[in-house]
Image: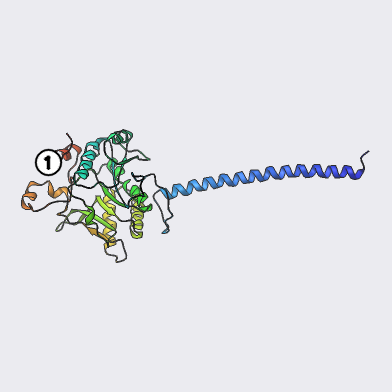
Amino acid sequence: MPTSCTIAMKRINLMYRTCSRSITRSLVIFLLILLAIGLVMTGMLETIASRRYLNSDHLPPRKSRIQPVSDEPPPKTVVLTTTNSAFLDLTENWLHSIQSCGVWPNITVIAEDRAAYEALRKMKFNIHVTLADQLSTADNLLFDTPEYKRFVNKRADYILALLHNGYDVLFSDVDTYWVKNPFPYFEEGYDIFTQADQLPPLPQVLCAGFVFYKASRQTLKFVRTWITRMASKKQTQPDQVVLNQLIMKSMKNKNGVKVKVLDPNLFVSGQFYFNDDWRSKNPHVQPVMLHNNWVIGHDVKVQRFKKIGMWSIK
């Protein structure tokens, strides 16, 4: 017969195994809870980092969905544009103009609707095409409409994503036409280079549709502020309006972002170049890039390009 000591030892051993199993289960549950919390926090941080507001001056490297087209080490500069189905022909004309001016940079085109994405992938250009996370309209966009504002106000987020990855970014609207290589005009000593839309004696207006952003600390802070300011407006304003407000303010601050306004006779606004009277008075002007702006509507832009022999689509 087992002694009382033996029985006691067996009971202690049973209690120990039961307790151990209970502790093990509790430990496993605790670790699973920690893991779940960690995953949630990681997702939240990634969401915050990839969105609009990046308040820290310390910019940890993050992988953007926008990747360079080449498998080689990434070049320093990305040419970026956005488009939709209604502007595919203008996009193709823009790409032909870049091709004809003897330079082929690393080009990323963000399609704002799925049909545009599929069509761009079939074009015979060496470009990187990506589909926007939040799709916009595929229809024709008219200046200053709510749909237009929502479309253009996404551009700053795309620019910031590339700047974070160390790329200089040349954002170019698809209604521009490149005649010469613009990159030699982006010299050292400045953070941002922008086209002038309107010149003195009228109030100077800078264009958000052709801007070169150097991936400097000051530029990153500026673009973050630009995005934050747009989001804080009670009434949606076009990105260009907010961009001008911030640049004018920064120009008065010696420690602000350094902005250079590109020569308006080289980077010509549509307000001037498509005016027959202006061209007759300025026959010496040999543009590097001209912008088919200051007119509303897709068809009018196409007719303008055709009239001056800058339409490359048959």
In percent of the image, x 24 and y 40: which residue is there?
A: 91
Q: Is residue 199 left or right of residue 147?
A: left
Q: Residue 175, can we see it?
A: no
**What quarter of the picture does the N terminus occupy?**
top right
Q: Looking at the picture, tell me which residue is in the foreground, 103 or 312.
A: 103
**What quarter of the picture does the C terminus occupy?**
top left
Name the spot of residue 19 as percent of width and height, x first.
75, 44
Q: Is residue 305 left or right of residue 76?
A: left
Q: Residues within 10 Å of mark 1 (few under 14, many from 20)?
A: few
Q: Secondary structure at mark 1?
A: loop
In percent of the image, x 47 and y 49: which residue is there?
A: 45
Q: Specify the farthest residue to the bottom.
A: 254
Q: Specify the farthest residue to the front.
A: 72
Name the spot of residue 288 as percent of width and height, x first.
17, 51
The number of discs equals 1
Q: Looking at the picture, tell me which residue is in the foreground, 188 or 32.
A: 188
In percent of the image, x 80 and y 41: which residue is there?
A: 14
Name the spot of residue 144 as percent of width and height, x first.
24, 44
Q: Residue 104, can we see it?
A: yes
**Coloured how?**
rainbow
Q: Is residue 23 left or right of residue 185?
A: right
Res 249 → quadrant? bottom left
Name the spot of residue 193 as percent of width and height, x first.
25, 56
Going by the numbered disc 1, the residue's amino acid type is Gly
Q: Report which residue position mark 1 lands on.
A: 309
